[in-house]
Image (cartoon, rainbow, N blue to C red):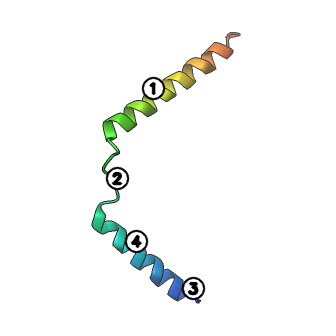
Amino acid sequence: MSIHSAAAQLVTLAAEGEEHGGNHESLNPLVTGGSAFIILLLLLWVTTLFNRDR
């Protein structure tokens, strides 16, 4: 398999993925973003909890 044929197969695979939109139906952006925000706030709280010397 040459580099050219491998690149052509990757381009074909990428073009097929664009037809479906790429998003899974069960993923809600609001829930995903809200969960990430809560996790980051929890990590910030844990960091400040252990950094009491300042």
Q: Which residue shows up at 50% across the image and 28% down it?
A: 40
Answer with mark 4 or mark 2, whichever residue precedes in sequence.
4
Amino acid type indicated by mark 3: Ile
Would you say 33 lies left or right of 1 here?
left
Find out whether the residues at labels 4 and 2 contact each other: C-beta distance under 8 Å.
Answer: no
Q: Which residue shows up at 68% across the image and 16% down it?
A: 50
Give me the C-alpha separation between circle 4 and circle 2: 16 Å
Q: Secondary structure at mark 4?
A: helix
- Residue denoted by label 4: 14
Observer-side mark, 1 or 3, equals 1
Observer-side mark, 4 or 3, equals 4
**What's the mark number on residue 16?**
none
Residue 6: x, y in percent? 53, 83
Picture quarter with the N terminus: bottom right
- Residue denoted by label 2: 24
Are there few (<14), some (14-19), or many (20+) residues within 10 Å of tag 4? Answer: few
- Residue denoted by label 1: 38
Q: Which residue shows up at 51% across the image and 88% down it?
A: 5
Would you say 4 lies left or right of 37 here?
right
In this view, 39 is above or below 50: below
Q: Quadrant of residue 15 in the image?
A: bottom left
Q: Secondary structure at mark 2?
A: loop
Residue farthest toward the right in the current orientation of the protein? 53
In this view, 17 is above or below 53: below
Observer-side mark, 3 or 2, equals 2
Are there few (<14), some (14-19), or many (20+) residues within 10 Å of tag 2? Answer: few
Answer with mark 3 or mark 2, whichever residue precedes in sequence.
3
Answer with mark 4 or mark 3, whichever residue precedes in sequence.
3
- Residue denoted by label 3: 3
Give me the C-alpha separation between circle 2 and circle 1: 22 Å
Answer with mark 4 or mark 1, whichever residue precedes in sequence.
4
Answer with mark 1 or mark 3, whichever residue precedes in sequence.
3
